[in-house]
Each structure stands twice: as C-alpha cells, then as structure tokens.
Image (spheres, rainbow, N blue to C red):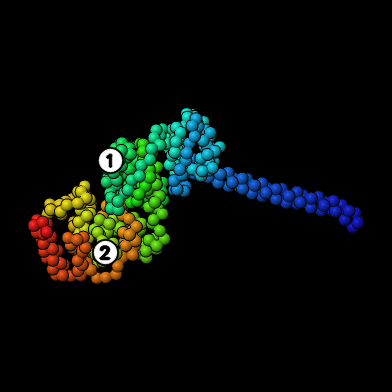
Amino acid sequence: MENMENQQTQPVQQTRRRSRRRKNSGCAGTVVYVIAVLGISIVLSLVAIFVANDVFAFVKDDAVKEITVAENTDVLSLAKQLDDEGVINYGTIFKLYVRLKGDNESVLAGAYALNPNMDYGQIIDTLANSTSTETIQITVPEGYSTMQIKQLLLDEHVCTEEAIDEALNDYEFKHEFLQEEKPAKQGWLEGYVFPDTYEIYKGNSTVVSSLNKMLNNFDEKYDDEIQAGAENLGMSMHDIVTVASLIEREAQQDGERATIAGVIYNRLNNPDSFPYLQVDASVLYGLGRTSGKLSEEDLQSDTPYNLYTKQGLPPGPICNPGYASLYAASHPEQHNYFYYVAMPDGSHLFANSYAEHEANIAASNAAQAAAASAEGSGE
C-alpha cells in the first residue's frame, strides 16, 4: 500500500514542480519584458529630448559659427553643412522640418553668422532672407547704453531702426545668463552687450547674429574670478552687472573703480545710516540722458533709477560695463569711505564723514572754478 501511495504521489509532486517552474519562468519573462519596455521608453524619451533641443534650441552652445554658403544652394542640401559646422546636430531632422514647413526655397549665397542657440525656424529665416554679405567693423565703447549702441548701428547704416528695436526688445535670446531678465522687454539686454570691437554683417536679418556675438563675448568675459567674487559677496550676476554699470559711469580713472565699488557696498551694507546710494549717473539714465548736471527738479524725479529717492540698487544696469568694472564690482576695495565727489580731471575725493565730504565738495568747486577761469582766460 505504501509503495502504491508513493507511486501515486510522485507524478503529482512532479506536476507541481513543473507548474512552479512555469510560473517562475512566466514571472521572469514578465520582468524582462517590463525592463525592456522601460529601457526602450527611456531611450526614446532621451532621443526625443535631444531632437527637440536641436529643433527648438532650448539649451545649446552660444558660440557664433561663420558659415559660407555657395551659389545655388537650397535649404535641404545645406543640412549636412550645418550639421558638420555644429550649428545643428541632426541634419536628417532638419531636412524633415524643412519639408514639413515647405521651406525649400534657395538660400542666398554669402557668409552668415549663425548661432547654435537659434532654433530651426530662425536659421531658415536668416539663410533665406539675408540680402547682404557686406561687413563693417564697429567699436562699442565701455559704458554705452543699449540705446547708444542702437544709435551707433544706425549711424553706421548697419540696419533699420525697426530691425534693431525688434532685436533689442522682442527677440528671445536663449543665453543662460539672461534667464533672470526674461521675459524680453525694452532694455532687457542692458548690461550684457559687451563693449568691444566687432566685425559684423550689414542687413536687417543679421542684427540678431551681431547681438549674439556681443552677448557671447559677455559670457566669456564674465569669468571664474568674477563669479567667485560675486559668490563671496553673496551677489547675483544681475546685481554684479548692475553695480559694475554704476562704476562704469562714475569712474573715469581705472585706479578708482574698486574704491568706488567699496563706497557703493558700504552704503548698501549700512542702509539705516545711508539709505540712498545717490549715484548721479543712475538718475541721468532714468531721465533718458547720459551727461549733464542734475537740477533740484531732476533729483526729485519719479523714476526707479533715482537713487536719491529710491533705496538700494536700481532695477537693473544703466549701461554696458567693461571687464575692469565687472571685476571691481566683484572685488571691491575694503575701506570706510561713504562719500565721493568728482574733480575736474575726472578723479574723485573720498570721505568717511559728511564733514569731510563737505570739505571735499568745497575743494571740488574751487578746482572747477579755477579750471573755468583758466579756460576763459585762454591759459
């Protein structure tokens, strides 16, 4: 009996083992399938992200690429060249985009300044609509405002006023350092159009490329030393550029930039005793002026840039500062000065008390009177 029972139970046990093996095998297969699906989904998602970034230029390199287009080149045949030059990453996707948009017109031959942070639509528009390959060399002086840069471009017949206004105020530049300034608005590039000498292309459709070149230059010049100084002061890039713009407009001698920076920070750090920065250049900016004496009425003007009535820093930069002022703003001189007054030669007298400041004002007035007298007598 026992043997018969054993014989009867063995097949049942074997069947159960096979059943367990099939279940385990089924579970393992399901896990492998799920992992495979997840893996494929992740890969496809990453590909989609990379492709979308290439098409819409969400986060891409800022370096300007100089591209020369040969005669009789159309947009589709240009895809490989743009891919090779690093303007785009996916030539095939670019071709597909062009086909879907129906933009298969010929590209005008010539040299173009393209930027990888342009999206596909902007690249096509630039290549299809540019009409000039003439270049011009311009110098943007330190301390120029964007309005002065605009006038410089107009004086040199680089573009129309409408084209420069649209580029300055409406175009959504994608530089990371501009994210704090968005959305695009009038004057939003103030402080970031780096002063330098540039070779740029004439024509309305090249204005964005020219401004990109200047913004890229700022990105290069705002180096690790300036960033480290800003972090040490607990200041954002926006604040550093704003302080630097005040320094740029106030200082006429390089050796005084860090000293003036120290005065600004001393006042900012002692708001109870010195609630106002009282920087004349900022008041002038708010009035739409770049020079001249301030009247009592000017000092009471109701603008956010009137640092005689508004506490703290102005809402943003008042000009486009050079490297020396950016460095001074991030590495101010340590001292106890809270006042300064200009002398006729462009230098300043500094003071840590109001009594000393009044004496300096008297000395400045006397020096200006003497200079005016000497000029009047022809000496």
Question: Horizontal placement of 59 versus 326: left or right?
Answer: right
Q: CA distance from mark 1 to mark 2?
A: 33 Å
Q: Quadrant of the C terminus?
A: bottom left
- The correct choice, above or below, for 164 with respect to 179 in the image is above
Within 10 Å of disc 1 (Cα), the crowding (few <14, some 14-19, many 20+) is few
- The correct choice, above or below, for 225 with respect to 46 in the image is below
Which structural element holds mark 2? Answer: helix
Which structural element holds mark 1? Answer: helix
Question: Horizontal placement of 377 versus 42: left or right?
Answer: left
Q: Residue at x 27, y 59 (%)?
A: 247
Q: Residue at x 29, y 45 (%)?
A: 149
Residue 34 at x, y = what percent?
A: 64, 47
Nearest the viewer among 70 and 192 is: 70
Q: Quadrant of the N terminus?
A: bottom right
- Most distant residue in the front direction: 379
Check disc 2 and report the residue beneath it. Answer: 256
Residue 191 at x, y = what percent?
A: 32, 52
Nearest the viewer among 46 and 259 is: 259
User: How many marks overall?
Assistant: 2
